[in-house]
Image: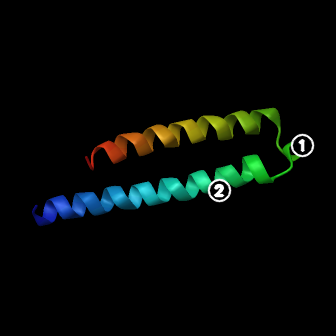
Amino acid sequence: MDSEDITELSRRADSLLEIEIKLRLMEYLVIYKDDSQLSKEQSMDISETIYCLIDEVIQLSSLFD
């Protein structure tokens, strides 16, 4: 493994951490906030974003295999 590989793995790990933080923030919004504070559109946007982020995590994590 050369320095380019290590740099790329580090970048991917940073991306996964950033995605995890975003997912946790959205989880807070969806689960812990009063649903009446969110419009139906906001709820749908959050759900769609969560699914996109989960897909991105799956794609990035498969690169570590």
In the figure, 19 relative to 53: above or below? below
Percent across and percent down for residue 10 are 29, 63
Horizontal relation, residue 15 to residue 65: left or right: right
Judge left or right: residue 52 versus residue 61. Answer: right
Q: Where is the N terminus found, in terms of image quarters?
A: bottom left
Q: What residue type is labelled 1?
A: Ser
Label 2: few (<14), some (14–19) or many (≥20) C-alpha neighbours in 10 Å: few
Tell me the number on the disc at residue 36. Answer: 1
Residue shown at 65% from the left, 37% from the top: 47
Q: How crowded is mark 1: few (under 14 residues within 10 Å), some or many (20 or more)?
A: few
Occupied quadrant, residue 42? top right
Question: What percent of the width, then of the height, locates residue 20?
Answer: 52, 55
Kind of element beneath mark 1? helix
Q: Which colour scheme is used?
A: rainbow
- Quarter assignment of residue 45: top right
- Residue 44: horizontal and vertical position, in percent? 70, 33
The residue to which callout 2 is attached is 25
**Residue sitting at the far left:** 2
Residue at the front extreme of this rendering: 65
Q: Residue at x 27, y 50 (%)?
A: 64
Labels 1 and 2: the sequence-earlier one:
2
Mark 2 is on which residue type? Answer: Leu
Residue 22 in the figure: left or right of residue 15: right
Q: Residue most toward the bottom? A: 3
Q: Tell me how far mark 1 sits from mark 2, CA to CA.
A: 18 Å
- Is residue 4 toward the left or the right of residue 38 in the image? left
Element on which disc 2 rests: helix
